[in-house]
Amino acid sequence: MSTTAAEATPAAATGSAASAVGSPRGVLELVITVRGGRSIASRQFHQGALRVLRPHYLDDSGQVCYVLVNPGGAYLGADLFVIDVEVGDGADLHLTTQSATKVYRTPGSFAEQRMSLLLGEGARLELMPDQLIAYREASYRQRAHITVHPSSSLVIAEIITPGWSPDGASFKYEELRLRNEIHVQVGDRTELLALDNLLIRPPLNDVTGLGFMEGFSHLGSLVVVDPRVGQELADDLHALTVGHDAHSGVSLTRTVAGTTGLVLRSLSNTTGELNSLLGACTALLRDRWHGQEPLNMRKY
């Protein structure tokens, strides 16, 4: 169902070279820099069905929070969304979504999101979208090309939830493919840190038995890249999962230029349980590394 590669080559792409058809339905570009002790957007561009709400600050750390909005409400067949985010030297961004990302029927071609993330020296990015919900006959691909500086910090937390079909059955979507390709800037070149591929393709008949997500319906994923990542942190995060109704595992990537990656996967049967679990993990990171309180976005 999923693999986390410590070493791989860009040629090891998930699936075929096909892509969503036509021009992007939505484009967003965001560049975050530091001014007056606070992180701000020095460039902001949006086109089509993507935009961000006005920035706000959740505490006095200077970290800026932007909320990504899709006014169209959902992803449909052949939709392509392109997101380009750069967090400059010393800047700090928390990026989330206004609501769940819904993928409806995609006849003829899959929906796709392509994301490029670039973190400068000492930069920090927390990318924590609301859950991805795939409905009946949906096919979706999400590709992220990520480049970090050895001193930067990246945290990505995502949840996948099956939508319900009219007959009340779950797992009626066709396929979900999520790919994170993470590189580290080393001098004037980049070196691959990890290639994290996730493929979920429900079988046609028995969709809940052993062998397909071990009988669970929801999946949570936490990706952390930071020079402070190591076995101790992996053990601490895994210990946090013990008190939750979820089946979890943690793996470390190779180390490049002093920075290491960590991937935590959790299987459960509710979005709420995974939100609680990933929230506990990110709260630990925020407190230990930055002295910040747990997040409380109060979206609902």
Image (cartoon, rainbow, N blue to C red):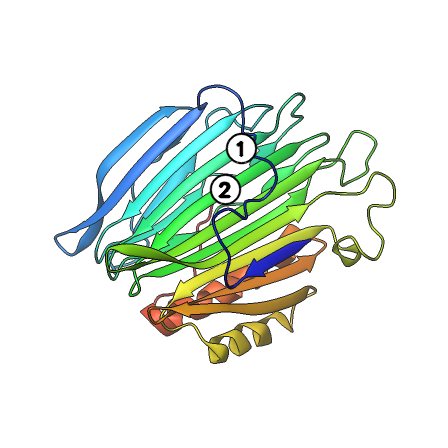
Q: Name the residue that disc number 2 marks.
A: 143
Q: Is 149 on the left or on the right of 95, as rendered?
A: left
- Badge 1 element: strand
Compared across the picture, whether 248 is left or right of 188 comes to right
Q: Secondary structure at mark 2?
A: strand
Task: Give the image location of residue 187, x and y in percent.
Answer: 24, 60
In depth, the one of 278 and 295 nearer the eye is 278
Disc 1 designates what residue?
112
Q: Residue at x 35, y 39 (%)?
A: 84
Q: Decide: is 285 above or below 273.
A: below
Answer few, some or many: residues within 10 Å of disc 2's Cα (few below 14, many 20 plus, some between 14 and 19). some
Depth check: give the residue in front, 271 or 200. 200
| Left or right for 224, reference 79 | left
Q: How many marks?
A: 2
Find the distance from the CA under tag 2 to the CA under tag 1: 8 Å
Q: Residue at x 22, y 58 (%)?
A: 90
Q: Pointer 1: residues within 10 angstroms few (<14), some, or many (20+)? A: many
Q: What is the number of the mark on residue 101?
A: none
Q: Tag 1: residue type?
A: Glu
